[in-house]
Image (cartoon, rainbow, N blue to C red):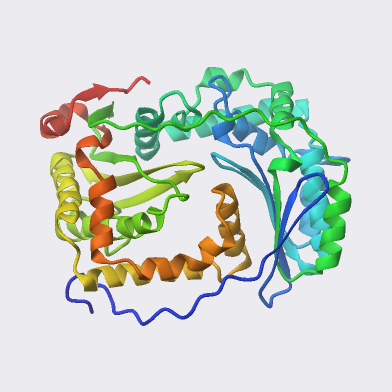
Amino acid sequence: MSPSTGAPEVGALAPFSLPAVERTTLAEGLSVALVPSGSIPKTYVRLVLAIGTGSEDSDETWLTRLIGDYLKEGAGDLDSTALADSVARMGGRLNVGVEEDTTTISASVLSEFAPDLVRLLATVAREPKFPESELERLRADLLRRLDLAKSQPGTLAASAFRWALYGDHPYGRLLASPELIAGFTADAVRATFEAHASPQTSSLYVAGLFDRAAVLDAAGAAFGGWTAPAQPKRAAASAASARAIHLVHRPGAEQSTLSIGLPVPDPGSEDYVALSVTNALLGGSFYSRITLNIREDKGYTYSPRSQVTAHPGDAYWAQLADVTTNVTGASMHEIFAEIDRLRAEPAAAEELAGIQNYVAGTYVLRHATPGGILDQLAFLDLHGLDEGWAAAYPDRVLALTTADVQRIAADYLRPDEMTIAIVGDSDAIAEEIAPYGEVTDVTST
């Protein structure tokens, strides 16, 4: 065991090489990435479209979620049941995932059906039905999800935190209103999707075992002739942070949910890799300092964590924790104390080495499966990075010094500029949180 952290000793990381990726661009502008990998006769196929919640106007919040639900309701000459059955006969299940910057239509199927799946995903993207008959049901489901989201302290804290950072930019609008959802129409769904779905801004990823020529032929035929208008220009994010507390009052809450952070460099920055390691050392791993302090030592919380969340050209760091109400202020004190300690004193070499092995090792493990490989390729493409960046990542992590980590903390993790969002009983915690910033009640926003 490591005497400084209690973490187990970790051996040297094996040499890492990125799986071979064949890239091509179809005549219509669709980017295609092929990654032969693995020994199991399965193929993972993903079509990634440049539409997400970050594309929404202020009167469209959660409309993209409705679009994601609607895409499974039929395409071409297939209704929802026939569409689901088609993928099931290939050995898979159709998935549609809506994120902030992308919508992904995907499935993994038996290798022999890879070309068929490519054709099917093209049909979903090019010929979605968006049937009027399903609108009321889908809106009702969205309203139920909104009610659930508003009952969860973590979601409320994230919403308050993001609004403080981004304001009325789409990244700052995490929660819709019932009135907005009730006003969504099938025509609005279709118009918004057609305005954003375009071959020039979409990517097809294929990984696993598959017939390369058959997959390329299927992609060329299925996406051939796909034309779409130029995409609307997305509003650039401009996050800002100031030391203040944004409080959501939950009467009688036994816990306070904290979200504390500020904007940091995005993945295109030279400092992003070092920032990822700094995050893991400070709060982003089980043996991180904040976790050992407020979970293992103090017992204030069960599952604290810090993370770097990145969008194209933008990112923020945040420490998250659900803490017992009567130690809300004490928890904030310890979090800021750990940040200040890392800014003032370099970490021990042994402590940093353990964190470096953890970060580099988990990165390598992400490339151990076809699905993980596609996750990484999509990340690279979203942030305009090349495969050389990915191949060099583990070595860059392991080359960092304690001085590098201290510099990152000093340059970017500035407590006096950190936004604080709290969901908790304001009557019970008012006195203990007062020293940490001016309090604004945002319960009704």
Q: Is residue 251 above or below residue 272?
A: above
Q: Is residue 427 above or below residue 402?
A: above
Which quadrant would the C terminus be assigned to in this image? Answer: top left
The residue positioned 72% from the left and 65% from the top of the image is: 43
Residue 439 visible from this viewpoint:
yes
* Residue 321: percent from left, percent from top: 28, 46
The residue positioned 41% from the left and 66% from the top of the image is: 396
| Tally of marks | 0
Q: Which image quadrant for residue 50? A: top right
Image position of 69 (left or right of 112): left
Q: Nearer the viewer, residue 369 or 294?
A: 369
Q: Which image quadrant for residue 159? A: top left
Q: Is residue 326 above or below residue 440?
A: below
* Residue 185: percent from left, percent from top: 69, 21
* Residue 230: percent from left, percent from top: 72, 31
Q: Nearer the viewer, residue 171 or 396?
A: 396
* Residue 223: percent from left, percent from top: 83, 47
Image position of 267 (left or right of 45): left
The residue positioned 77% from the left and 27% from the top of the image is: 133
The residue positioned 61% from the left and 32% from the top of the image is: 64
Residue 284 visible from this viewpoint:
no
Which quadrant would the N terminus be assigned to in this image? Answer: bottom left
Image position of 374 (left or right of 407): right
